[in-house]
Amino acid sequence: QEASSYRTGRVSGRSRIDTLRLGDDKPFSGRIISVLSSNSKGDSLVGLLNDTSGRSPVDAFVQSLAALRDEGFRRVWLAQLPFDPDLTTLLAVALREVDTIEVGSGVIPIQVQHPTQLAQRALTLNVIRGGRFTLGIGMSHRMVAEQMWGVSWDKAVRQMREYLDGLVPLLEG
C-alpha cells in the first residue's frame, strides 16, 4: 500500500521482534528494539521519507503521518538513513501534531551518536506524547560505517553490547 510521500510495504507474517522491555515505573517505559522482522497483525507500516514533493521535509512528514493515521494504521516504523533529516527531530514535531498513531525507529544507527544523546531524545519523544515512541537501534551497514563515517566495523556485537550498557541505565532513570 502506497501512502503519500513514503515508499511503503506492509509488514505481515509471523513476527520476530527481540525487545528489551523496561518497567513502566521508569522514565522510558517504551521498548528498545534490536531486531525487527514483522508484525503478525498487519497493522504496521514500514516507511522511508523519500519524496517531499518540494515541501519542507517536516511538513511532508507530518502530513504523511496524519494520512497514515487516517487510513487506519496504528503504528509506523521509520529508518534513519545517512542523508535524511534527523529522524528523532522529525518525530518530535510529528508526535506533537498527530495524535494516536505510534511510531518506532527501525533503526537508528548507534555508531554516530553517544548513548546519552540518544537517551535524551528517546525520553523527550515519550514525554511529548505519552509513550507512543518505540526506540529501535542497530548497527549501520559496514560500507556506511567505514566509508562514510570512518567508524570501524570490527567487533560489531561488542560495540552493540557496550552501547546498550551505556544506554539502558540512562533510559531507566
Image (cartoon, rainbow, N blue to C red):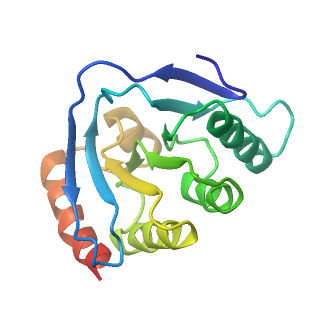
Q: Residue at x 29, y 29 (%)?
A: 37
Position of 51 compared to 137: left or right?
Answer: right
Q: Is residue 115 visible?
A: yes
Residue 173, quarter of picture: bottom left
Figure check: 17 above or below 115 = above
**Residue 33 in the image: x percent, y percent?**
29, 48
Figure check: 86 above or below 166 = above
Residue nearer the viewer, 145 or 9: 9
Residue 22, quarter of picture: bottom left
Total marks shown come to 0
Residue 26, quarter of picture: bottom left
Position of 155 compared to 150: left or right?
Answer: left
Position of 20 compared to 96: left or right?
Answer: left
Q: Residue at x 47, y 57 (%)?
A: 132
Q: Residue at x 41, y 41 (%)?
A: 106
**Residue 52 in the image: x percent, y percent?**
77, 34
**Residue 84 in the image: x percent, y percent?**
61, 43
- Give the residue furthest to the bottom: 173
Figure check: 30 above or below 35 = below
Q: Is residue 155 visible?
A: no
**Residue 61 in the image: x percent, y percent?**
70, 43
